[in-house]
Image: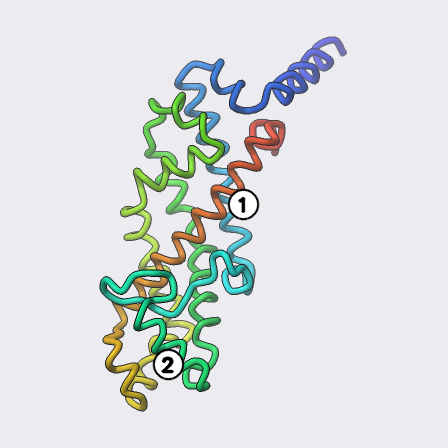
Protein backbone atom coordinates (compact mmCIF):
# COMPACT_ATOMS: atom_id res chain seq x y z
CA UNK A 1 0.00 0.00 0.00
CA UNK A 2 2.84 2.38 0.97
CA UNK A 3 4.74 1.47 -2.21
CA UNK A 4 1.67 2.13 -4.34
CA UNK A 5 1.17 5.49 -2.62
CA UNK A 6 4.82 6.38 -3.21
CA UNK A 7 4.52 5.43 -6.88
CA UNK A 8 1.39 7.54 -7.28
CA UNK A 9 2.98 10.51 -5.51
CA UNK A 10 6.06 10.19 -7.72
CA UNK A 11 3.92 10.31 -10.84
CA UNK A 12 2.08 13.37 -9.53
CA UNK A 13 5.37 15.14 -8.81
CA UNK A 14 6.69 14.32 -12.27
CA UNK A 15 3.45 15.55 -13.82
CA UNK A 16 3.76 18.79 -11.86
CA UNK A 17 7.32 19.34 -12.99
CA UNK A 18 6.44 18.78 -16.63
CA UNK A 19 8.23 16.62 -19.11
CA UNK A 20 10.94 19.21 -19.80
CA UNK A 21 12.00 19.28 -16.16
CA UNK A 22 11.84 15.49 -15.89
CA UNK A 23 14.07 15.02 -18.92
CA UNK A 24 16.46 17.79 -17.91
CA UNK A 25 17.14 16.05 -14.61
CA UNK A 26 17.79 12.66 -16.22
CA UNK A 27 21.04 11.30 -17.66
CA UNK A 28 21.51 11.78 -21.41
CA UNK A 29 20.71 8.14 -22.18
CA UNK A 30 17.50 8.30 -20.15
CA UNK A 31 16.59 11.58 -21.85
CA UNK A 32 17.05 9.93 -25.23
CA UNK A 33 14.92 6.94 -24.33
CA UNK A 34 12.10 9.09 -22.97
CA UNK A 35 12.25 11.50 -25.89
CA UNK A 36 12.25 8.54 -28.26
CA UNK A 37 9.15 7.21 -26.53
CA UNK A 38 7.37 10.55 -26.74
CA UNK A 39 8.31 11.01 -30.39
CA UNK A 40 7.21 7.46 -31.20
CA UNK A 41 3.84 8.03 -29.57
CA UNK A 42 3.45 11.40 -31.28
CA UNK A 43 4.26 9.86 -34.65
CA UNK A 44 1.83 6.96 -34.21
CA UNK A 45 -0.96 9.29 -33.11
CA UNK A 46 -0.33 11.71 -35.99
CA UNK A 47 -0.27 8.98 -38.63
CA UNK A 48 -3.41 7.36 -37.21
CA UNK A 49 -5.25 10.67 -37.52
CA UNK A 50 -3.97 11.38 -41.03
CA UNK A 51 -4.89 7.90 -42.20
CA UNK A 52 -8.56 8.61 -41.53
CA UNK A 53 -10.59 9.19 -44.73
CA UNK A 54 -10.55 12.84 -45.71
CA UNK A 55 -8.05 13.89 -43.03
CA UNK A 56 -5.63 15.67 -45.38
CA UNK A 57 -8.32 17.23 -47.53
CA UNK A 58 -10.50 18.42 -44.65
CA UNK A 59 -7.67 20.25 -42.87
CA UNK A 60 -6.93 23.42 -44.81
CA UNK A 61 -3.61 23.86 -43.00
CA UNK A 62 -2.18 20.69 -44.54
CA UNK A 63 -4.40 20.11 -47.58
CA UNK A 64 -2.25 19.07 -50.52
CA UNK A 65 -2.55 21.38 -53.48
CA UNK A 66 -2.37 20.50 -57.13
CA UNK A 67 1.08 19.24 -58.14
CA UNK A 68 3.95 21.68 -58.40
CA UNK A 69 6.85 21.19 -60.78
CA UNK A 70 10.42 22.41 -60.94
CA UNK A 71 11.19 25.67 -59.14
CA UNK A 72 7.77 27.27 -59.39
CA UNK A 73 7.50 27.03 -55.60
CA UNK A 74 4.67 27.42 -53.15
CA UNK A 75 2.03 24.96 -52.01
CA UNK A 76 -0.32 26.27 -54.69
CA UNK A 77 2.25 25.70 -57.42
CA UNK A 78 2.87 29.22 -58.76
CA UNK A 79 1.97 29.59 -62.46
CA UNK A 80 1.31 25.88 -62.80
CA UNK A 81 -0.98 25.98 -59.80
CA UNK A 82 -2.88 28.87 -61.37
CA UNK A 83 -3.30 26.95 -64.63
CA UNK A 84 -4.49 23.83 -62.86
CA UNK A 85 -6.77 25.79 -60.55
CA UNK A 86 -8.33 27.45 -63.57
CA UNK A 87 -8.89 24.02 -65.06
CA UNK A 88 -10.42 22.89 -61.81
CA UNK A 89 -12.87 25.81 -61.83
CA UNK A 90 -13.85 24.86 -65.35
CA UNK A 91 -14.64 21.34 -64.14
CA UNK A 92 -11.75 19.80 -66.06
CA UNK A 93 -9.93 18.33 -63.07
CA UNK A 94 -12.98 17.10 -61.22
CA UNK A 95 -12.15 15.41 -57.92
CA UNK A 96 -8.45 15.00 -58.57
CA UNK A 97 -7.39 17.21 -55.63
CA UNK A 98 -9.38 15.06 -53.24
CA UNK A 99 -7.86 11.91 -54.73
CA UNK A 100 -4.37 13.32 -54.29
CA UNK A 101 -5.10 14.02 -50.62
CA UNK A 102 -6.64 10.57 -50.21
CA UNK A 103 -3.44 9.06 -51.62
CA UNK A 104 -1.38 10.90 -49.00
CA UNK A 105 -3.69 9.56 -46.31
CA UNK A 106 -3.28 6.00 -47.54
CA UNK A 107 0.51 6.41 -47.52
CA UNK A 108 0.42 7.89 -44.01
CA UNK A 109 -1.48 4.87 -42.78
CA UNK A 110 1.31 2.58 -43.97
CA UNK A 111 4.25 4.76 -42.90
CA UNK A 112 4.62 3.86 -39.21
CA UNK A 113 7.51 1.39 -39.70
CA UNK A 114 9.39 3.99 -41.74
CA UNK A 115 9.14 6.60 -38.98
CA UNK A 116 9.88 4.06 -36.25
CA UNK A 117 13.13 3.15 -38.02
CA UNK A 118 14.09 6.80 -38.33
CA UNK A 119 13.39 7.45 -34.64
CA UNK A 120 15.36 4.36 -33.59
CA UNK A 121 18.34 5.54 -35.63
CA UNK A 122 18.42 9.05 -34.17
CA UNK A 123 21.34 10.04 -31.98
CA UNK A 124 19.99 11.45 -28.75
CA UNK A 125 23.28 12.89 -27.55
CA UNK A 126 21.64 16.23 -28.41
CA UNK A 127 18.67 15.52 -26.14
CA UNK A 128 19.38 18.30 -23.63
CA UNK A 129 19.07 20.85 -26.44
CA UNK A 130 16.10 19.17 -28.09
CA UNK A 131 13.94 19.26 -24.96
CA UNK A 132 14.04 23.05 -24.78
CA UNK A 133 11.61 23.26 -27.72
CA UNK A 134 8.01 22.12 -27.35
CA UNK A 135 8.37 20.22 -30.63
CA UNK A 136 12.15 19.78 -30.49
CA UNK A 137 12.02 16.07 -31.24
CA UNK A 138 9.94 16.66 -34.35
CA UNK A 139 12.29 19.39 -35.56
CA UNK A 140 15.31 17.16 -34.97
CA UNK A 141 13.68 14.23 -36.75
CA UNK A 142 12.96 16.40 -39.76
CA UNK A 143 16.43 17.95 -39.89
CA UNK A 144 18.22 14.64 -39.62
CA UNK A 145 15.91 12.26 -41.50
CA UNK A 146 13.74 14.24 -43.91
CA UNK A 147 15.55 13.09 -47.07
CA UNK A 148 15.56 9.45 -45.99
CA UNK A 149 11.88 9.60 -44.98
CA UNK A 150 11.02 11.21 -48.31
CA UNK A 151 12.79 8.45 -50.22
CA UNK A 152 10.97 5.72 -48.32
CA UNK A 153 7.59 7.43 -48.41
CA UNK A 154 7.65 8.01 -52.18
CA UNK A 155 6.90 4.36 -53.10
CA UNK A 156 3.88 4.36 -50.77
CA UNK A 157 2.60 7.57 -52.34
CA UNK A 158 3.28 6.19 -55.81
CA UNK A 159 1.25 3.05 -55.12
CA UNK A 160 -1.62 5.07 -53.67
CA UNK A 161 -1.69 7.53 -56.58
CA UNK A 162 -1.71 4.62 -58.99
CA UNK A 163 -4.38 2.72 -57.07
CA UNK A 164 -6.67 5.76 -56.90
CA UNK A 165 -6.26 6.46 -60.61
CA UNK A 166 -4.56 9.86 -60.28
CA UNK A 167 -1.89 9.08 -62.87
CA UNK A 168 -4.45 7.75 -65.34
CA UNK A 169 -6.59 10.83 -64.81
CA UNK A 170 -3.70 13.19 -65.53
CA UNK A 171 -2.69 11.17 -68.61
CA UNK A 172 -6.22 11.35 -69.95
CA UNK A 173 -6.48 15.08 -69.28
CA UNK A 174 -3.13 15.70 -70.96
CA UNK A 175 -4.50 14.20 -74.17
CA UNK A 176 -7.50 16.54 -74.12
CA UNK A 177 -6.15 19.82 -72.73
CA UNK A 178 -3.01 21.65 -73.78
CA UNK A 179 -2.53 23.40 -70.43
CA UNK A 180 -2.03 20.01 -68.78
CA UNK A 181 0.57 19.03 -71.39
CA UNK A 182 2.26 22.41 -71.06
CA UNK A 183 2.56 21.90 -67.32
CA UNK A 184 5.06 19.11 -67.96
CA UNK A 185 3.52 16.80 -65.40
CA UNK A 186 4.63 13.20 -65.29
CA UNK A 187 4.46 10.37 -62.79
CA UNK A 188 7.71 11.36 -61.08
CA UNK A 189 6.89 15.05 -60.67
CA UNK A 190 3.37 14.32 -59.40
CA UNK A 191 4.73 11.82 -56.90
CA UNK A 192 7.43 14.19 -55.66
CA UNK A 193 4.99 17.05 -55.21
CA UNK A 194 2.49 14.95 -53.27
CA UNK A 195 5.25 13.40 -51.13
CA UNK A 196 6.76 16.82 -50.35
CA UNK A 197 3.43 18.28 -49.31
CA UNK A 198 2.40 15.09 -47.53
CA UNK A 199 5.55 15.17 -45.38
CA UNK A 200 4.83 18.80 -44.50
CA UNK A 201 1.44 17.73 -43.19
CA UNK A 202 2.79 14.67 -41.37
CA UNK A 203 5.45 16.69 -39.55
CA UNK A 204 2.92 19.39 -38.69
CA UNK A 205 0.76 16.75 -37.02
CA UNK A 206 3.69 15.03 -35.30
CA UNK A 207 4.71 18.42 -33.87
CA UNK A 208 1.19 18.98 -32.53
CA UNK A 209 1.14 15.56 -30.93
CA UNK A 210 4.61 15.99 -29.42
CA UNK A 211 3.58 19.28 -27.84
CA UNK A 212 0.49 17.62 -26.39
CA UNK A 213 2.47 14.70 -24.93
CA UNK A 214 4.92 17.14 -23.39
CA UNK A 215 2.03 19.03 -21.78
CA UNK A 216 0.71 15.72 -20.44
CA UNK A 217 3.70 13.80 -19.03
CA UNK A 218 1.54 11.04 -17.58
CA UNK A 219 0.19 10.29 -21.04
CA UNK A 220 3.54 10.77 -22.72
CA UNK A 221 5.76 8.85 -20.30
CA UNK A 222 3.51 6.42 -18.44
CA UNK A 223 0.53 5.87 -20.76
CA UNK A 224 -0.22 2.39 -22.04
Q: Earlier in the sequence, mark 1 or mark 2?
A: 1
Residue 72: horizontal and vertical position, in percent?
27, 65
Residue matched to label 2: 169
The x, y position of residue 122, in whole percent, is: 34, 32
In the displayed structure, 196 sits above or below 223; it is below
Q: Is disc 1 in contact with disc 2, using a CB cutoff of under 8 Å?
A: no
> Which residue is under mark 1?
45
Which secondary structure lies at badge 2? helix
Identity of the residue drawn at 53% across and 18% down:
21
Q: Dot 1: within a 10 Å radius of its alpha carbon, few (fewer than 14), some, or many (20 or more) residues?
A: some
Residue farthest along the top direction in this orientation: 2
Dot label at residue 218: none
Quarter residue 197 falls in: bottom left
Vertical placement of residue 176 versus 222, above or below: below
Q: How is the image coloured?
A: rainbow
Q: Residue 93 at what x, y percent from top left?
A: 42, 81
Amino acid sequence: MVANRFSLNRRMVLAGLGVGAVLAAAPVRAQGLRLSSILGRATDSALDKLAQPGAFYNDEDIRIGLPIVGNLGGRSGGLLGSLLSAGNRLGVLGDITRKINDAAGVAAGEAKPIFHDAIDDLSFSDAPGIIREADGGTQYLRRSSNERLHGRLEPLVDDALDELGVYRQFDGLAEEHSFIRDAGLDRQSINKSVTDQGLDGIFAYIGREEREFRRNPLGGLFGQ
